Image: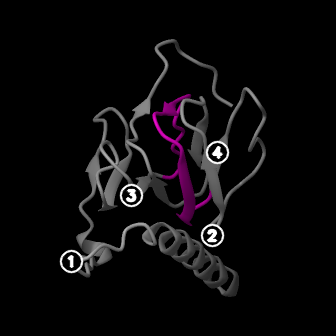
Amino acid sequence: MRQRFRNYLGACASALTLGLSAAQGFAQPGMQNRYIPANKLPWYREAPSLPVQLAPLWGDRAKEEAGTLLQTPAGFVSGLHSHTADYWAVVVRGAWKHWVASTGEGVGLTLEPGAFWTQKHTQLHEDACVSKEPCIIFLFNKQPYVTQFPSAPTKKQ
């Protein structure tokens, strides 16, 4: 129980640090405080064929700088894909794997709550929720961000 609480605190601290760093560029005259309880997050599916849900926290990731939560079921494997923008990520819940097969980066690492990684735009990579519980990941992008899948089938790791 203590380890789970420490993991939770680590995830909160990492997300807060990333959020505060990102927020430095957001403070604008006329900015309003905003609160979204967890049970009111506006989850939606980006692609009907994937069991992935997104919840925008601020911004529209397809058009601008944004903070977004990604939720996947336990056992989810993304398949090879890339994105149109660099992003920063923090594991909030579950155990996650993120790897770049072409370079070996991230291969063999399991990322638990509080873990952080970055991903360069257009670089093909894969992700997986390897826990028995669903995974939630906090994503931050500065440039418009769209997920792209290669047209040819690929081998899973």
In the image, is residue 125 part of the stretch drawn in magenta?
Answer: no
- In whole angstroms, how far apart are the C-alphas of marks 4 and 2? 14 Å
Q: Which residue is mark 4?
A: 98
- In whole angstroms, how far apart are the C-alphas of marks 3 and 4? 17 Å
Q: Quadrant of the C terminus?
A: top right
Cβ–Cβ below 8 Å for labels 1 and 3?
Answer: no
Q: Earlier in the sequence, mark 4 or mark 2?
A: 4
The residue under label 1 is which amino acid type?
Gly
Q: Earlier in the sequence, mark 1 or mark 3?
A: 1
Q: Earlier in the sequence, mark 3 or mark 2?
A: 3
In the rendered image, residue 24, in percent from the top left (x then y), is placed at 46, 72
Q: Earlier in the sequence, mark 3 or mark 4?
A: 3
Give the number of the disc on residue 128. none
Answer left or right for 50 relative to 11: left
Magenta residues, as a range?
Answer: 74-95
**SS type, badge 2:** loop
Q: Which residue is mark 3?
A: 68
Q: Which residue is mark 2?
A: 114
**SS type, badge 1:** loop
Task: Residue lying at the far top in this picture: please name it.
Answer: 152
Q: Dot 4: few (<14), some (14–19), or many (≥20) neighbours within 10 Å?
A: many
Q: Which residue is mark 1?
A: 30
Front residue (pair 138, 72): 138
Question: Which residue lies at the image location 52% right of the left edge and 76% below the top edge?
Answer: 16
Snapshot colouring:
one colour
Cβ–Cβ below 8 Å for labels 3 and 4?
Answer: no
Task: Residue lying at the far front in this picture: please name it.
Answer: 29
The residue under label 2 is which amino acid type?
Gly
In the rendered image, residue 82, in percent from the top left (x then y), is placed at 52, 32
In the rendered image, residue 37, in percent from the top left (x then y), is placed at 28, 78
The residue under label 3 is which amino acid type?
Thr
